[in-house]
Amino acid sequence: MSHEIEADFKDNWETEATQCLNCTSFENHEGVGYCSEAKGDVPFTAHCDFFQSKE
Ligand code: SF4
């Protein structure tokens, strides 16, 4: 599926602390990354401007 997010989405983000995996919008759907902001699947290692840290 396409990423309809318009927030400078990057598939491979080098800084682990700010990858989707650590974002409040990220959900792990049985091993598949899902973004509640983009309402679609995202790689664990992606990133966009809507990033908000879980920490
Ligand atoms: S809002 Fe952006 S950084 Fe956060 S999970 Fe979605 S795509 Fe990743």
Image (spheres, rainbow, N blue to C red):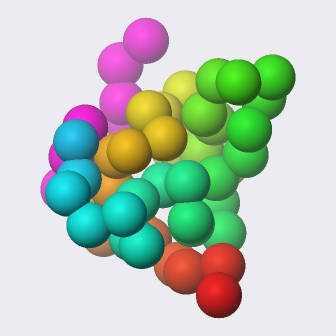
Say above or below: 12 vs 6.
above
Q: Residue shown at 55%/54% (left/top)?
A: 21
Residue 6 seen from this side: no
- Quarter where residue 15 is shown: bottom left
Mainly helix, strand or loop, the magenta region? loop
Near-viewer residue (7 or 28): 28
The residue closer to the viewer here, 36 or 10, is 10
Could you say where residue 3 lies in the image, as x and y percent from the top left?
Answer: 36, 30
Residue pushed farthest bottom? 55
Can you say whether 11 is above or below 37 in the image? above
Residue drawn at point x = 73 percent, y = 46 percent: 27
| Residue located 64% across and 53% down the image | 26
Q: Residue furthest right?
A: 30
Magenta highlight range: 1-11
Q: Looking at this view, is 39 or 13 the one in front?
A: 13
Position in image of residue 37 (x %, y %): 58, 54
**Residue 53 appears in the picture as rendered:** yes
Question: Which quadrant: the N terminus?
Answer: top left
Determine whether, in the image, residue 44 is placed left or right of residue 25: left
**Left or right of 16 in this view: 8:** left
12 left or right, relative to 30 = left
Magenta span has 29?
no
Q: What percent of the width, then of the height, locates residue 5?
A: 36, 45
* Quadrant assignment for the C terminus: bottom right
The residue that appears at 81% across and 23% down in the rendered structure is 30
When asked about the image quadrant of residue 18, the answer is: bottom left
Residue 5 belongs to magenta span: yes
Relative to residue 9, is residue 15 depicted above or below? Answer: below
Using the image, determine if residue 14 lies above or below residue 27: below
**Farthest top residue in view:** 1
